[in-house]
Amino acid sequence: MQINHPGRQIQADMPGVVWGPSAVGVDLVKPSGGSYESPVMSGRPADARTRASEAYFLDLAKDLVTTSPLPLMLTGGITRRTTAEQALADGVVLIEMGTALAVTPDLPARWRDGREADRYLRPVNWPDKALASAAGMAQVRHQLRRLARGTHPTPPGTHPAYALLTEQLRQRRALRRYRTWLPTTQGTAIADRLA
């Protein structure tokens, strides 16, 4: 279960929040966070302490490990093996890496060989934080689509404006297809009910 918190201001409340899911059979908790005003999850953290850290939620996870009845999963900006190993040593049981693997899909093999990632996404430093966050996430999805097609990621990553524009066009086409499909399925469902 992912627990999203908008920032460090409620970090003190998180241990109490984790106890609830344990009572209903949840197996794992993933602390996450950010908002469009302070999108930590897309590499634009709010405070200097978080910004300096590669793993955006490591401090929170370390605090929760001592009080949580559930195992914790860590996500958020992990690209270096030493960071992942430190998180595991601090009691986190699972590491999630999306962006790092979208850009460097052979990262686990590199780590085994003692090497680190050498490709990173272009930073999105636009003044509009919500737009910058959307562009950053579009960059990751663009790289994942390239991998799905069997092509390598684009070093140093696709330009954020291009990724965002192509993402918007792709979503618009999908919405048009859905709007065309929807009346036919609704008509079938109504006909089935009347029969």
Image (tube, helix red, strand yellow):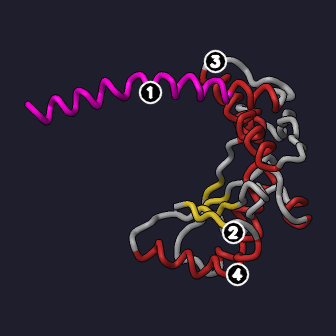
Q: Earlier in the sequence, mark 1 or mark 3?
A: 3
Asked which quadrant contains residue 123, the reply is top right
Q: Do the residues bearing badges 2 and 1 touch, measured as CB atoms within 8 Å? A: no
- The CA span between labels 1 and 4 is 45 Å
| Residue 67 shown left or right of residue 186 in the figure | right
In the rendered image, the vertical position of residue 83 relative to residue 145, given as above or below: below
**Amino acid carrying mark 3 in the image:** Gly
Q: Nearer the viewer, mark 1 or mark 3?
A: 1
Quadrant containing the C terminus is: top left
In the rendered image, the vertical position of residue 163 relative to residue 149, given as above or below: below
- The region drawn magenta spans 167-195
Residue at the spot of label 1: 179
Residue at the spot of label 4: 12
Residue at the spot of label 2: 61
Q: Do the residues bearing badges 1 and 3 touch, measured as CB atoms within 8 Å? A: no
**Camera-nearest residue between 113 and 51:** 51
Q: Earlier in the sequence, mark 3 or mark 4?
A: 4
Q: Nearer the viewer, mark 2 or mark 4?
A: 4
**Amino acid carrying mark 4 in the image:** Ala
**Amino acid carrying mark 2 in the image:** Ala
**Camera-nearest residue between 185 and 101:** 185
| Residue 175 among those drawn in magenta | yes
Q: Which mark is residue 149?
A: none
